[in-house]
Amino acid sequence: MSIAPKGIFVPLITPFNDDETIDFQSYKKVIDFQIESGVHGLLVGGTTGEYHVMSLEERKSLIKAGCEYAAGKVPVMTGVGCSTAKETIELANYAAECGAKWGLVLPPYYHKTSEEGIGEFFKEVAAKSNVGIVIYNYPGATGVTISPEMIYELSQEENIVSVKESADFGHLCEVVSLTKDAENFTVFTGEEHFILPTFSVGGQGAFGILVNLLPKELVELYELAVDKHDINAARDLNRKLSGIYGLMEAEGSPYPGPVKAGMDLIGIKGGKVRKPLTQPTDEIKTKIKDELVKLGYEVKSPVGVTEV
């Protein structure tokens, strides 16, 4: 049985070459940066990693590389969501062969099913997968909301060990309350603004696009809030970071473009996003640069932006 994850997990970006092939050399550098910064785990091939604009073979190559580059230093979760349970199970078991501990799974979407159908989908995936299953509740992208009651029901399954909540905060709070006594089950937020509030109500972990850019700061936020129970210090750090939170999904600059631009500014290749995603605007790049300077970073001038 897979042990439930907890802590700060980075949903890794995927750097691309100019021809939009995966830049594996830069990918290793991104992973090294995260490990050196103290993150508790990696998420390979999630939404921030642009899995949705990749072929199945590319997804597999990214999973294999991510597991090899992590080299057992930190545990790896992989995005394995597919349209059918059969495809999801096949990708999850491929990830297990590569060394992944968990698979992040979206509910069935587009052709919407019933709550019962969603539950049976996850139960089948969990029963036939060799990685621990993490439910991904992301109604903003899928158009499907998994009810707190269904998440509680699924938390009772032996191989379903966690949920990534990217719904509203009230939904997350209800899930935390319902699953508080579930054995080997944790609740993560997927939203930067909700990281500190999630820890305050009993959640055990967080993903965030921004972890790619500011891993040390977000690991520190976890340590202050969860390990040291120093809410005042955690609140002060959260205030310092709040200015950059909203820039990660700024209107007109679809993510992960902004965080990739931010990484370029601190000297770690983020690079361009893959079509049909569009590149971040110069305005967003400048705002990210300004926030990084406030946090004490030495940054380059954004490409295409002239210093005044």
Image (tube, rainbow, N blue to C red):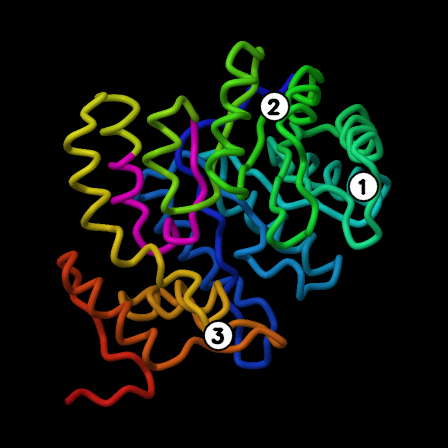
How far apart marks 2 and 3 lie (CA) works out to 34 Å
Q: Secondary structure at mark 2?
A: strand
Question: What residue sits right under mark 1 in the picture?
Answer: 90
Closer to the eye: label 2 or 3: 2
Residue at which label 3 appears: 272
Q: Nearer the viewer, residue 15 or 108?
A: 108
What label does residue 161 carry, if any? 2
User: x%, y% of residue 106?
Assistant: 69, 43
Q: Relative to 195, is 176 on the left or the right?
A: right
- On screen, residue 19 versus residue 94, left or right, reads left
Q: Main secondary structure of the magenta part?
A: helix
Element under disc 3: loop
Residue shown at the point (21%, 62%) measured from the top left? 292
**Kind of residue at badge 3:** Lys
Identity, as a three-letter code, of the amino acid under mark 2: Val
Closest to the observer, 148 or 186: 148
Q: Say which label, 2 or 3, has the lower sequence index.
A: 2
Q: What is the quadrant of residue 74 in the picture?
A: top left
- Residue type of the residue flagged with mark 1: Glu
The relative height of residue 270 versus residue 59 in the rendered view (above or below) is below
41 left or right of 136? Answer: left
Closer to the eye: label 2 or 1 = 2
Horizontal relation, residue 222 to residue 185: left or right = left
Secondary structure under badge 1?
helix
For label 3, count other residues whose C-alpha is less than 10 Å away and answer few (under 14), some (14-19) or many (20+). many
**Neighbour tally class for label 1: few under 14, some 14-19, many 20 plus, Cα within 10 Å:** some
- Looking at the picture, tell me which residue is in the foreground, 273 or 252: 252
Task: Give the residue furthest to the front.
Answer: 170
**As rendered, which of 134 and 36 lies closer to the eye?**
134
Q: Please report the bounds of the magenta region as a residue range.
A: 204-221
Residue 280: x, y in percent? 43, 75
Residue drawn at (70%, 45%), measured in percent from left and top?
144
